[in-house]
Image (cartoon, grey):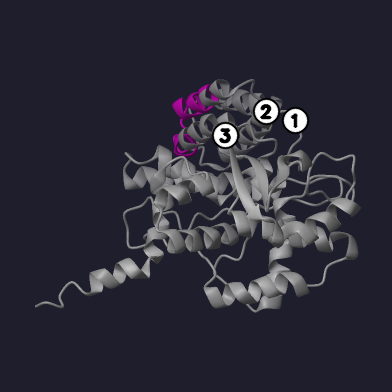
Amino acid sequence: MRYPLDNKKKFNNNLLFWLDRFVKSKLTSLSNRHVTNNKKLSYIIGMLNRGTKNIDELKQLTKDARNIGLIGINTYINPLVKFYKYIIQFNYKSIKYIDEEVLSEFLASQTGSLSDATKKNYRMSLVAFFSFIDKQNEDKKGNSHQFRIELKNWGGLKSSHATKLPSHMRDEELKRFLDAIETTEFKNYARAKNRLLIKTILYSGMRVSEALGLHVKDVILEDDFYVFGIKGKGNKPRIAMIKSQYLKKDLQEWLHVRDKNSLFLFQSRTAKPLTQSYVSYIMDKILINAGVRKEKNGAHMLRHTFATKLYQKNRDLVLVQEALGHADINTSRIYTHFDKERLKIAANTMDDM
């Protein structure tokens, strides 16, 4: 049986709901030849069907399952319990707001002192969990939300597969992309909205989830700049500023046609908040029109493009951290890899020999 992705009122209850069902699926698929108490196993599965009251109850049930012989469940539950306690502090409105960046930051912050083997277990657990949700969620219209979590580029493991530099557009590609924003065809109602959404992310570096969470009241015109009040991860507030010349025409056109009863700046034709899959659809159309293809083509590439340009222009790592809302400056440090001027200094090292 499939379920709506957000079928509970609160985010933590929704996440716990899916953890219950994922753990149940593992208990019924792991080898049970070492199980010493089948009656106890049936009881545990029945409790998971009913739904646990909290994460500690789920942890206890999996501990009971392990104690009767289902040792393999320990590989999954420990990382997922830690992930649950980490992620609920952000007070997300929907599970849909969880993406690869969120998961990578969780892994980076929570597994630093662990062995490579344990880190692999953490990655495997998260990928398996979200793959399970991909297959089991379905709304009333028969549509399902796809996370497609792979974490292939997570750099926490000390192996030959080191962290890849984030996908971004070079100057020539960026120029084509900016032209394509204006020329890509969309339905009349969505044309200004789509242009405004992509430009807002590109010119500010905000996360896709942050852009989708903007309210109309969060945008204020001051002098020649639009000032955006952003709620970042953990509801941490920050602001972003974009020159009005980049957005004014699209913003005015969109504000004129959008449903005035909705609080959200970006909304569907039925006045519902937009989804990340919708943003991916827009990105695909514009990238195809621009003739730009990357290993990672999602809208998160716009954030990397902004951050790369910001660092190349200013050589200010603290500014990158503040603009992108990174809690740790080490997260921002990846963009120093694109600093060719610094690398030229390194290339000159042996000249006086």
First in sequence: mark 2 vs mark 3: 2
In magenta segment, residue 70: yes
Q: CA distance from mark 2 to mark 3?
A: 22 Å
Say if 310 sits above or below 211 in the image.
below
Q: Foreground: 17 or 35?
A: 17
96 on left or right of 159: right
* Residue marked by disc 3: 236
Residue drawn where x is 79% and y is 45% of the image: 273
- As helix, strand or loop, the secondary structure at mark 3 comes to loop
Say if 191 sits above or below 25 in the image.
below
* Residue marked by disc 1: 8
- As helix, strand or loop, the secondary structure at mark 1 comes to loop
The stretch of residues the image draws in magenta is: 60-76
In magenta segment, residue 181: no
Residue drawn where x is 49% and y is 36% of the image: 73
Q: CA distance from mark 2 to mark 1?
A: 6 Å
Could you tell me the amino acid type at mark 2? Answer: Asn
Q: Foreground: 225 or 18?
A: 225
Q: Are marks 2 and 1 in contact (CB under 8 Å)?
A: yes
Residue 102 in percent (x, y) is at 54, 45
325 on left or right of 229: left
